[in-house]
Structure formats: C-alpha cells, structure tokens
Image (spheres, grey):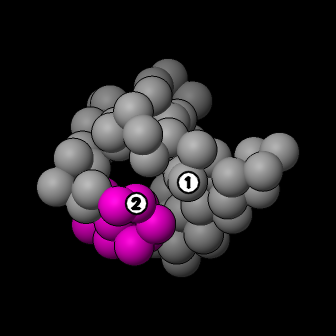
Amino acid sequence: MKELLVSLASGLVENPEAVEVTVDEPNEEGVTVYHLHVAEGDMGRVIGKQGRIANAIRVVMRAAATRKNETVSVEID
C-alpha cells in the first residue's frame, strides 16, 4: 500500500525525491493512516483544484485496501 501511494504521488510532483510516506499503526477501529509528505512547491499539484486530485488518491487507496480487507485513510501533510 505504501508503495502504491509513493508511486501515485511521484507521478504528480516535480520533485519525486521529496515524496515521503509514513504509516501509523491501525487504530482501535482498524484504520491505518498514511501520511503523505511532499515538497512545499508540489503541494498544489497533489491537492489539485478543490481537492479533486487528493480525493482521487484517497479513492484509489481505499479501493486497493478493500481488495486486501483493510481500511485506510490518507492525510496530506
């Protein structure tokens, strides 16, 4: 899952070396939180107009997690 998020974000940004993903342990509800960190100048590229790209990233991650019977959440920091 982490590799999927890194590859999605790296394709969007101008500085793919700055893409970092940290993963929290599943909380009491079983939700694993992925924190996406990108360079300051690439933040707009990852979020998109009105958050459309960020929502699309979250949808893809949720769909992939559903195939593995997991629950995930993506936060862009």
Which residue is rendered at x = 69% and y = 52% of the image? 48
- Whether residue 75 is visible to the viewer of this picture, yes or no, is yes
Give residue 39's quadrant in the image. top left
The secondary structure type at the circle numbered 1 is helix
The span shown in magenta is 2-14
Q: Are marks 1 and 2 in contact (CB under 8 Å)?
A: yes
Residue 45, labelled with which disc?
Answer: 1
- Whether residue 59 is visible to the viewer of this picture, yes or no, is no
Give residue 7's quadrant in the image. bottom left
Residue 22: percent from the left, percent from the top? 26, 37
Which residue is rendered at x = 54% and y = 52% of the image? 46
Is 74 displayed left or right of 62 in the figure? left
Q: Earlier in the sequence, mark 1 or mark 2?
A: 2
Residue in front for this viewpoint, 43 or 3: 43
Is 22 displayed left or right of 68 in the figure? left
Q: Residue at label 2?
A: 13
**Location of residue 50 with respect to 9 vertically, above or below:** above
Residue in front for this viewpoint, 46 or 1: 46
The secondary structure type at the circle numbered 2 is loop
Which residue is rendered at x = 57% and y = 30% of the image? 29
Real-space Cα distance between discs 1 and 2?
A: 6 Å
Q: Quadrant of the C terminus?
A: top left
**Location of residue 4 with respect to 39 vertically, above or below:** below
The residue at the far left in this view is 17
**Location of residue 11 with respect to 6 vertically, above or below:** below
Q: Magenta segment, principal secondary structure?
A: helix
